[in-house]
Image (spheres, grey):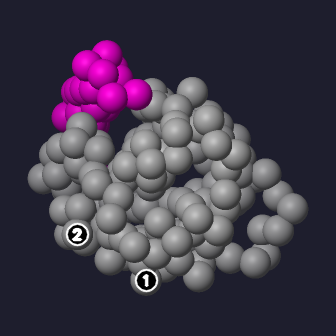
Amino acid sequence: MLGLQYREDSKAVAREAYFYAKKLNLTGYGTDVWVFDIDETSLSNLPYYATHGFGVEPFDVTSFNEWVEESKAPALPESKKLYYKLMKLGIKIVFLTGRPESQRNATTHNLLLAGYHSWHKLILKDGQYGGKTAVEYKSEERRKVEEGGYRIVGNIGDQWSDILGTTNGQRTFKLPDPLY
């Protein structure tokens, strides 16, 4: 989780994503977007898990939500580098997370503090998705992005539910997850 291999694997994925993005024939009309997951993709919750035994303790949703509200999660360095490189290429960023809408302010604040200074959309989960899987939720939200006239040229996440399903983009990239 804290070792060199995790960082090296993350670098490899981000590097391949950037090499792919550089070769894209972008439309030039501002309609090309890249979807980033947030938890364990853009922001790291390892400080939270480190203080809770890296999964040895049972997961406590109340405690985790308190952590989210503190807006202290650091950026994952390789993802943040990719974010800046993609923006320089003219690709707009869409953050798509399973965090609830009630955490919008904390999430926005945390992204800004971590160095993610702008994005096109920040999509959080609202009440209409109760009972749906993460794959169903993220597929539906990506479909809405495309129906809004955007082309998803890339999609990156640490969990398969971030990148599977429908309307997942022209290419997907799976980051390692430090917890499993």
Magenta stretch, main secondary structure class = helix
What is the spatial separation of the Cα atoms under label 2 and label 1, in whole angstroms? Answer: 12 Å
> Three-letter amino acid code at disc 2?
Leu
12 over 83 or under it: above or below: above
- Of the pair 92 and 128, the residue shown nearer to us: 128
Q: Residue 30: image x %, image y %?
A: 28, 64
The magenta stretch spans which residues? 1-27
8 over 168 or under it: above or below: above
Instruction: Report helix, strand or loop for mark 1.
Output: helix
| Residue 163 shown left or right of residue 11 in the figure | right
126 over 6 or under it: above or below: below
Tell me the residue at 43%/61% (across/down).
95
| Residue 87 shown left or right of residue 145 in the figure | left
Magenta stretch containing residue 169, yes or no? Answer: no
Residue 92 visible, this angle? yes
Residue 13 visible, this angle? no
Residue designated by label 2? 113
- Of the pair 152 and 162, the residue shown nearer to us: 162
> Three-letter amino acid code at disc 1?
Asn
Q: Residue 139: image x %, image y %?
A: 67, 52
**Residue furthest left as drawn:** 88
Q: Quadrant of the C terminus?
A: top right
Tell me the residue at 38%/49% (across/down).
47
Tell me the residue at 30%/22% (across/down).
3
Tell me the residue at 41%/61% (across/down).
94
Q: Residue 105: image x %, image y %?
A: 43, 83
**Residue furthest top as drawn:** 5
Instruction: Report helix, strand or loop for mark 2.
Output: helix
Q: Residue 122: image x %, image y %?
A: 44, 71
Magenta stretch containing residue 20, yes or no? Answer: yes
Residue designated by label 1? 105
- Of the pair 27 and 137, the residue shown nearer to us: 137
